[in-house]
Amino acid sequence: MATALISTSECCVLLIAISWKQPTVHSGSNSPGPDPHPTPSSRSTPPRRAKPSDSMRSPPRPRHPAPARLAAVALLLAALAGGAAAAAVAAGDGYGRGRRLYMRNKVLEMFYHAYDNYMIYAFPHDELKPLTKSFTDSLSELGNLNCNIRLLGGLISGHILAKEYISHLKDGLYQDQLLHLAENLGRRFLPAFETPTGLPYAWINLKYGVMENETTETSTSGCGSLILEMGALSRLTGDSRYEAAALRALRKLWSMRSSLNLVGTTLDVVTGKWIEYSSGIGAGVDSFYEYLIKAYVLFGSEEYWDMFHPAYLAVQKYHEADMRTGEATHWQLTSLQAFWPGLQTLLGDVAAANISHREFYNVWQRFGVLPERYLLDFGILHPTEKYYPLRPEIAESTFYLYQATKDPWYLEVGEAIIGSLNYYTKVDGGFASVRDVSTMKLEDHQHSFFLSETNQNYIFTTEGHPLPIRSTWHEKIPTTHVPSNWTFFKDDSQPIRVSALSSQVCPETIFRQSVGSPWESACHIPDVFSTHRCRTDDDCGVEAVSCRRRTCSMAGYCGLWLGVY
């Protein structure tokens, strides 16, 4: 994912170029830049085995046509941004406009090559198998993280684009259909948060909710990378439940940090205990940091900054370490970690971002793509994680750094990235993942994020869905007012203590006020069992702070998030 900051009078949009469908773009024969149809003999061999120390110097221009997707990134900006954005990209950096347009069109061509093949050979199935020109249904089970970043994020950003940025849909042709789908999905997603800790289950069945005997293990990213989409959904619908659920999980997660301000990788959502104590910025943790800083930008609450800043300082100090002791656990680079220079740039730590980026790009230059895991202490590939599944993170970071510095070297890096993708991974049926970067043997799989992140121009969330930055989104969503009184439910046998909230939820029920019975708050009703286990909703009470009725989940726990006020 890549991201640029475009300022307007009332909003900023973090972006990178959304390519609207048009006939496949082919550059004219006079277009500057690399040969659009290079023969094998005309392609330069990507540099191999570069010395690690080289990455800290001002690198020479990449010798091969291009490693992969980010030069495009800056070039793409002009596609949707236009005006000021295009001017910013074109401002005196010595990287000619014609060359920029050529690379932009090259990326559009890449996107349509991947997308058209998906539509021809795979739609409506999950993903394309580009080598055999067939399909796979690889997403039959949906983790809550992917439910949020792929489905919910896609619907929300699609709604915003359709509502505000696509002129021919403005005149009554679009009636918030995508937002209605997003709200429906959000409601189905809420049962995942029905745990004693408020941390969501890793898996959710969108029809039946949390299944019986569901695993209670999840990742830090799975709990801490929800606030952007769910917060945006609350802002768009006025329903605070979505943001409240995500924020409660985020607060709980932050409360579990160590004395060093480090977080682990996996945890138990029922006990609130860590399972894996390894800390770092790689898989299982990466988007936790990303969402903290972006939530601060998007919603303006200093609470997010107060979490992010100490977490950032801690992980910069300890890198990959045991969260309890700070003792180093690994010295490695992974492809998912390559988002970090972009995050550092967004933060304003550009000098550190430049150093980080050079290290990742050095490994890219050595192999022509970025392997999933590279062992720095031995200078070798990980024995089993040698693959490259067309990830976008290094492209994103390159884009950020170009926008921050306007150094044309980053455009050259982007051009190199594009070249590598076309040289190594493009096939007749789309773009194939690399199974082994040491041999460049391909795998019959084109991941969906290649379309949503690698080949695009507008970006904000971790899955590449744009969200606008609006001053109105910095305002807190009001919660439902509940009178400060309590009641008894009139039953044929005996009174059952309920809250004032129940009289609003069930107005058809007969209530009468009563006194003389102890109560803990204006509306608190304890769960029947102190373990918070339940058989039916009758075993659940009302939460004191929010005055909301708790309900019994399919997993057998009382929770707040089934949507009853």
Image (tube, rainbow, N blue to C red):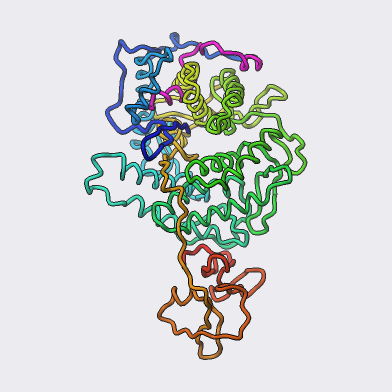
- Asked whether, in this view, residue 486 is left or right of residue 21, the answer is right
Can the viewer see residue 5 in this picture? yes
Asked whether 449 falls inside the magenta stretch, the response is: no
Q: Residue at x 43, y 41 (%)?
A: 469
Q: Residue at x 67, y 56 (%)?
A: 272
* Residue 95 position in % (x across, y down): 41, 14
How many discs mark residues in the rendered view? 0
* Residue 318 position in % (x across, y down): 71, 34
| Residue sitting farthest toward the bottom | 492
Q: Is residue 486 above or below residue 274?
A: below
Asked whether 54 falls inside the magenta stretch, the response is: yes
Foreground residue among 47 and 471: 471
Can the viewer see residue 420 in this picture? no
- Asked whether, in this view, residue 433 is left or right of residue 237, the answer is right
Which residues, given as a range, are shown in magenta?
Answer: 51-77
* Residue 48 position in % (x across, y down): 59, 14
Q: Residue at x 46, y 38 (%)?
A: 460
Q: Residue at x 48, y 10 (%)?
A: 44
Q: Is residue 492 above or below residue 563?
A: below
Res 137 → quadrant = top left
Q: Is residue 491 above or below residue 186?
A: below
* Residue 185 position in % (x across, y down): 42, 55
Res 26 → quadrant = top left
Foreground residue among 552 and 474: 474
| Residue sitting farthest toward the top | 41
